[in-house]
Image (spheres, grey):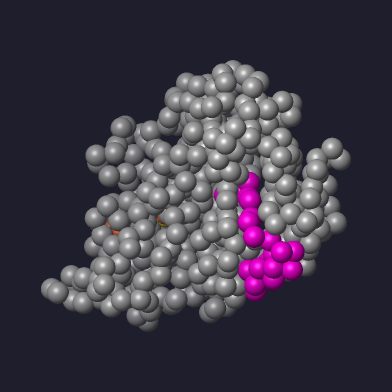
Amino acid sequence: MTLADFEQMMDRCVRCSKCKFLDGILVKSKKYSQVCPSIQMYNLHAYSGGGRVIMANALYKGRIGFSDEMLDALYKCTNCGACEVTCKMYYDIEPNEIISEFRATAVESGVAPMPKHKKYIELVDRVHNPYGEEAEKRQAWLPKDVDVDEASQTLYFVGCTAAYRRQEIAEATARILNAAHEPFAILGSDESCCGSPVYRVGDRKRAIDIMKQNVERFKQQGIKRIVTSCSGCYNMLKVEYPRFVDFDFEVVHISQLIEKLLAKGKLKLANPVPLKVTYHDPCHLGRMSEPYEKWEGKLVEVLALVYMHDPPKPIRTGARGEYDAPRNVLRQIPGIELVEMERIREYAYCCGAGAGVKAAYPDFALSTAQNRLEEAESTGAQALVSCCPFCSTNFRDGIRERGSPLEFYDLTELVARSIGGGE
Ligand code: SF4
Ligand code: SF4
């Protein structure tokens, strides 16, 4: 796709600013009524979903050119998709998809991505992870007493962040699979970045190359099912890969698999974990993991600026993301009490780290994490739980910076603790 495919959508943006806030009926307090971390931080329309749609449209129509100010607004966005959900309460406009195309256009024009992004993309090219770590160390997290079955058709795709930065999540995931007698393979030093950090900043061509190489590797290994413990990897494999490359693998997030294993009685949560927790929906497991259904109909103008889709187009509202599996698992851990924040499920507020923001604008990432931590603290929970190594890193940084009394756990850590293998 290109910006041209979104022209009518861009024309239809009425500048109502609904993409900045929860819909009125969903607001529980003024304090937590905003959904867009970017407009909350920078407070200028250009830093909102709608503002970026207007800029993209003006650029597409040749009325303005790229400028440093425009690129600043374009890249201070976590691609969290909250604007897309709230806009859809009223209109069929996809601000987040338009932002992705806008970034891809900027990269194709040679003015983007940002220097910090270029630096990590070079590392992905060279050592297949954005952290610049050696490929040989990619499975350093793997404890000697964990069983890996290289012949298994189920692959645990560890991902760069769990492999190098949040190894406790990789270890907990492997121990859970072992405890349930679910055989799994890993790619070890042959595993490569899923492409998310490259794709999200608009380097589409390079991201598609990474997708093709990964698919080839999965085929060579005889993989049929891919399990991820990272919401970013899950989103790429489940939603983005099928949009760009031939992809015929089942993709499962570990929270979904644990829920199934518990239902089958293959996993027993015996040890109590006495903790009052609140759950943060990762954007890429929640609203962004709803499949993007291809639609190839036509738009019929029935009145000036009023169009109908012929045939009707599936509307991606975010409601079909994964919200229940992590909560159902948490509720089955003895001793856990789950309390909810005000903004949850498809209306959840972002952790602040995604789409190159943590690398290029760390202060913005931290500030967003602190907004979310304040909301989590207000529930009276002792701990914040999520399902993504990238959320984990940003929230742990935010907790330290803020001096927050909250502990942070990935869901896999609590499950591993309850089955007796995570202390
Ligand atoms: S993107 Fe949607 S919600 Fe935002 S200003 Fe435009 S029409 Fe309104
Ligand atoms: S994707 Fe998220 S951060 Fe970016 S404009 Fe939309 S709501 Fe704001």
Q: Quadrant of residue 300?
A: bottom left
Seen from the viewer's position, the closer of residues 192 and 47 is 192
Seen from the viewer's position, the closer of residues 326 and 231 is 326
Residue 395 location, x and y as percent? 59, 38
Q: Total label count? A: 0
Residue 71 location, x and y as percent? 49, 66
Query: Is residue 118 visible in this depiction of the protein?
Result: no
User: Which quarter of the rendering shows the N terminus?
Assistant: bottom left
User: Which quarter of the rendering shows the C terminus?
Assistant: top right
Q: Is residue 177 above or below residue 132?
A: above
Looking at the image, which residue is at 85% across and 56% down? 136
Query: Which residue is at the far bottom?
Result: 62
Range of residues picked out in magenta = 209-232
Seen from the viewer's position, the closer of residues 395 and 418 is 418
Query: Which residue is at the far left?
Result: 303
Looking at the image, which residue is at 60% across and 72% down? 208
Residue 85 location, x and y as percent? 35, 52
The stretch drawn in magenta includes residue 99:
no
Looking at the image, which residue is at 49% across and 33% down? 328
